[in-house]
Image (cartoon, rainbow, N blue to C red):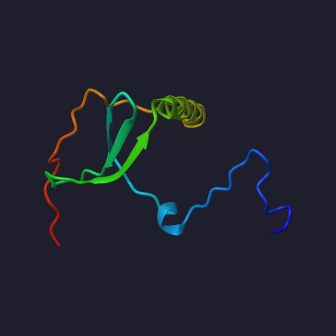
Amino acid sequence: MSDENKPKQGQINIELDEAVAEGTYSNLAIINHSISEFVVDFVNIMPGKPKSKVKSRIILTPQHAKRFLKALADNVERFEKQHGEIKDYEKTPIPMNFGPTGQA
């Protein structure tokens, strides 16, 4: 391994395979916690479907959850400075059956 490909001291070499790099779409996150961990379930609710499955689950230590919260807040702030305020639709409940089912 050449010197330029070796991770520098204190750095971690993180690999991202193609399947993970494609990502998973989610329009709902469900968060639960215990004394020792936070569990974030990512769900994709589709129109006309009264049922869905968890697409991805991330489990974090409380310390990492707090660092993640700060990092996400910092990124949202930078996004809004560049693109304008993100509208918050918190008052609108998520309909479990929004719209008719599609037909082909």
Residue 95: image quadrant is top left
In the rendered image, the residue lying farthest to the front is 36
Residue at horizontal 51%, vertical 30%?
Answer: 63
Name the residue: 79% across, 63% down: 5
Q: Quadrant of residue 101?
A: bottom left
Q: Position of residue 10 (x, y in %)?
A: 75, 44
For the C terminus, give its image quadrant.
bottom left
Viewer-side residue, 78 vs 35: 35
Q: Could you tell me residue 69's position as x and y percent?
A: 49, 31
Q: Residue 66: x percent and y percent? A: 50, 28
How many numbered marks are there?
0
62 vs 75, nearest the viewer:
62
Which residue of the protein is positioned furthest toward the right in this rendering?
Answer: 3
Q: Residue at x 79, y 47 (%)?
A: 9
Residue sticking out furthest to the bottom: 104
The relative height of residue 55 versus residue 36 in the rendered view (above or below) is: below
What is the x, y in percent for residue 61?
46, 35
